[in-house]
Amino acid sequence: MKLLSIAVGAAMFAFGLVGVANAQAAPENTLTISLKDGDVVIELLPDVAPNHVERIKKLAADGAYDNVAFHRVIEGFMAQTGDVQFGDMEEGFQPRRAGTGGSDMPDLKQEFSDVPFDKGVVGMARAQNPDSANSQFFIMLEDGHFLNGDYTVFGRVIDGMDHVENIKLGDKAQNGVVADPDRMITVRTGS
């Protein structure tokens, strides 16, 4: 019984340290997305997906993600955004093509990991080819472990998940396509 008590105490201590580490992500490895309801802070995971993190940071630094629509949002699953080619709601927005574009940079090779797709995890969207991720990404609204090992995880929400949950939902009959979608107002790296 004493060993069980020690084990539970050690587990609680370790969990507490993990929670503190997540809340104190290195500033250079944070991404802040300003939404209509407030900011969402994402801890980037360069040890898990270094090339994807580098791409996200570059696009954010260039302002490419500013005003980009959440073009596909499926209740109980995920909110997808990041189409910098057709999803910019201030310049050249093409709602029928949003979700089919990317940046002018080459596609990325997959960086699959054992990080599970839990609620708040951020992954790269791609076509059928595992090496086709470019600029689009999604934020999990609930656990989606059926994605594990098939999509690249590059971050996780550490603050503002309630704002993500308020993103306008898409039409179920249209596979989550959103009419008059919400947008990422600004996206910045660092704190």
Image: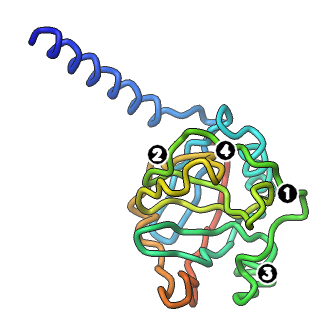
Instruction: Look at mark 1 in the image and give the residue it sits on.
Output: 107
Query: Percent from the top left, x then y, of residue 79?
Result: 53, 68
Q: Residues within 10 Å of mark 3 (few under 14, many from 20)?
A: few
Q: Is residue 118 left or right of residue 90?
A: left
Residue at 26% of width from left, 24% of height from top? 12
- In front: mark 3 or mark 1? 1
Tell me if residue 42 comes above or below residue 39 in the rendering: above
Q: Residues within 10 Å of mark 4 (few under 14, many from 20)?
A: some
Q: CA distance from mark 4 to mark 3?
A: 33 Å
- The N terminus - image quarter: top left
Instruction: Look at mark 2 in the image and give the residue it sits on.
Output: 158
Q: Earlier in the sequence, mark 2 or mark 1?
A: 1
- Name the element at disc 2: strand
Marking on residue 154: none
Marking on residue 112: 4
Q: Is residue 74 left or right of residue 44?
A: left
Q: Report the amino acid beneath label 1.
A: Asp
Tell me if residue 95 comes above or below residue 28 in the rendering: below
Q: Report the amino acid beneath label 2.
A: Ile
Q: How many marks?
A: 4
Query: Percent from the top left, x then y, of residue 56?
Result: 73, 51
Q: Is residue 115 left or right of residue 64?
A: left
Tell me if residue 60 comes above or below residue 84 in the rendering: above
Marking on residue 91: 3
Residue at 60% of width from left, 69% of height from top? 80
- Name the element at disc 1: loop
Q: Report the amino acid beneath label 3.
A: Glu
Q: CA distance from mark 4 to mark 1?
A: 15 Å
Residue at 68% of width from left, 72% of height from top? 68
- In front: mark 2 or mark 3? 2
